[in-house]
Amino acid sequence: TVGNRAITSSDVVNEVKLLLILSNESYSEKNKDRLHKIAISTIVKRNIKKIEINKNNFLQYNQNDLNKEVEKLAYNINVDVDTLKNICASNDLDFALIEDQIKTELLWNSLIFHFYKDRLSINIEEINDQLKLAQNKKKLNEYLISEIIVRPIQGQDAESQIQILKNKIETEGFEKVAMDLSITESSIKGGDLGWLNENQLSKRFKKIIVSTSVGNLSEAILLPEGILIFKVRNKREVERNLNLEMEKNQIVNTEKTKILNMYSLSHYDKLRRSVAIKFYNE
């Protein structure tokens, strides 16, 4: 149980099916325990969010946003939405579960924005300076990036934690570690952030990502919420097709999203400590 919400073994089975479909992974006895652990963790997280959403009566979402996110999920595994629905049906999984997962995230993000919108302080001057430096460039560099953020361990120095994390990534693979350990919403996608252009990267992160070779891990970055490591999966050069004002808006939105993500993690942590979670043996 999560608060007063009952979670059944069939819920866990369905969550495992969902994880396998969205990560293009196959089920085996070898990965059974890991998948069940991730499934329980994601179910708990989603239900804690639902408790907060319902408590605040924050139940309105945009249908177009839902449709776009469904299309994005399908695109991530190289299928269209109808094919994704057929995959769910063939695995005896109700497609409504995927929609419910997306709805919860849309409502949660709206709730976090509602709570913290007055704290979205963006340094516009720094963004303007950044754009001035790039305004004569006809092309932009884009980076295909994944992330892992893990919580700091009390009583253990950062360097030891970083080395343990890097060793784990080397032996188990970045995507698996992201799914197992990362506290960000990207964890369900193996940490995938997609393609980001150089103007969308904060000054601090840009310097680190630019200096990281394709296929390699970035140096570890210490954040208030934990330890961050990027993986630069690919790099490309694209034509610059936005005017300065549109680029500025894009950067501002990216910065707001980063800040809101930090507040999201912090708000969830507070809730997690206040909600009773109990496990019962059959």
Image: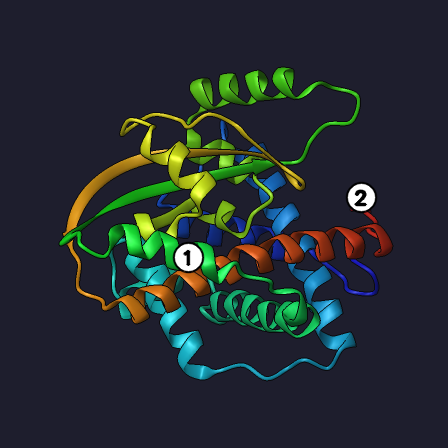
Asked where in the image residue 106 lies, by quadrant, the reply is bottom right
Residue drawn at x 56%, y 38% is: 149
Question: Which quadrant, please, contains the N terminus?
Answer: bottom right
Query: Could you tell me the amino acid type at mark 2?
Result: Asn
Name the foreground residue: 240 vs 90: 240
- In the picture, the disc for residue 281 is 2
Q: Position of residue 89 (x, y in %)?
A: 38, 65
Residue drawn at x 48%, y 49% is: 186
Q: Is residue 188 above or below residue 92?
A: above
Q: Position of residue 5 (x, y in %)?
A: 77, 64
Q: Is residue 214 above or below residue 20?
A: above
50 to the left or right of 68: right
Q: Is residue 15 above or below residue 27?
A: below
Query: Could you tell me the amino acid type at mark 1?
Result: Ile
Is any part of residue 244 visible from this angle?
yes
- In the picture, the disc for residue 100 is none
194 to the left or right of 160: left
Neighbour class for label 2 at 10 Å: few (<14), some, many (≥20)?
Answer: few
**What is the CA distance from the residue labelled 2 to the residue labelled 1?**
54 Å
Residue drawn at x 55%, y 23% is: 165
Residue drawn at x 66%, y 57% is: 263
Asked where in the image residue 103 lies, by quadrant, the reply is bottom right
Q: Which residue position is annotated with label 1?
A: 127
